[in-house]
Amino acid sequence: MTAEDYQSGQVLLIDKPLTWTSFQAVNKLRWEIRQAFNIKKIKVGHAGTLDPLATGLLIICTGKMTKQINTFQGQDKVYTGTFVLGSTTPSYDLETEIDQSFPTEHISEALIHETTKQFIGDIEQLPPVFSALKKDGKRLYEYARAGEIVEIKSRTVHISEFEITTINGHHIDFRVVCSKGTYIRSLAHDFGKALNSGAHLSVLRRTKIGDFDVKNAVSPKDFIASLSSE
């Protein structure tokens, strides 16, 4: 591939590593493309943020293909991961420490499977306070880290599939197909409440966005290696 190819527009499928932010992935690839082809400036953006503690499919667009980002973002997404029953965290995942514990003795496998039905279709969801959404020009996580309480409005999202794939004690593996704007961390939190207990997200992986599949994605390391061979 040439500098012109990247500037005219490419869609790169990247398997985001754990702890990387989506912003870091974009910055890293932009810098490497510029270095590899001695380009002063090139547009690079991603189609849908993944949390630092999530892995999986990140669509990164270059050049003129950045105009397609909104189209890609609007497509359904598929996630797999693990909920942990019996405890919650302020961020709804492992970014923060456990703050509350709840009883789980009443929860049966049948109840877990039955409860998923409450979350199929259009549902109202509150985004996590530890999220990158903006309110009055500041990210919600900035308020949260400063200990400030802000009012967050719920939003309507759509979940077309929600299946429990494995139950291993308090650890529940799941697969979800959902619309743009769905927070799986919030789903974990709400699922725990629906079970009259608590839950948080311990593992999250995005496997598909529309027809794009993580099976066809490469790690940032492998993508960078491929640049040096071009």
Image (cartoon, rainbow, N blue to C red):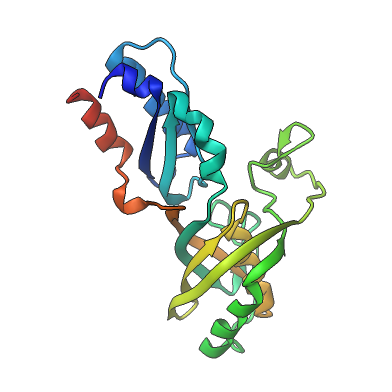
Q: Percent x, y for residue 80?
A: 44, 63
Residue 230 vs 12, above or below: the answer is: above
Q: Percent x, y for residue 166?
A: 42, 78
Which residue does the image show at 32% across and 16% down from the upper left? 35
Residue 224 vs 108, above or below: the answer is: above
Q: Quadrant of the C terminus?
A: top left
Query: On the image, which quarter does residue 92 sit in?
Result: bottom right
Q: Percent x, y for residue 159?
A: 59, 65
Which residue does the image show at 24% across and 26% down from the upper left? 227
Q: Quadrant of the N terminus?
A: top left
Q: How many marks?
A: 0
Query: On the image, which quarter does residue 144 sit in?
Result: top right
Between 127 and 229, the one lying in front of the other is 229
Query: On the image, which quarter does residue 193 sit in?
Result: bottom right
Q: Percent x, y for residue 145?
A: 68, 42
**Residue 173 appears in the picture as rendered:** yes
- Left or right of 219 in this view: 190: right
**Residue 48 appears in the picture as rendered:** no
Which residue does the image show at 63% across and 62% down from the upper left? 158
- Left or right of 213 in this view: 176: right
Which residue lies most toward the left here? 229
Which residue does the image show at 49% across and 75% down from the upper left? 163
- Left or right of 34 in this view: 128: right
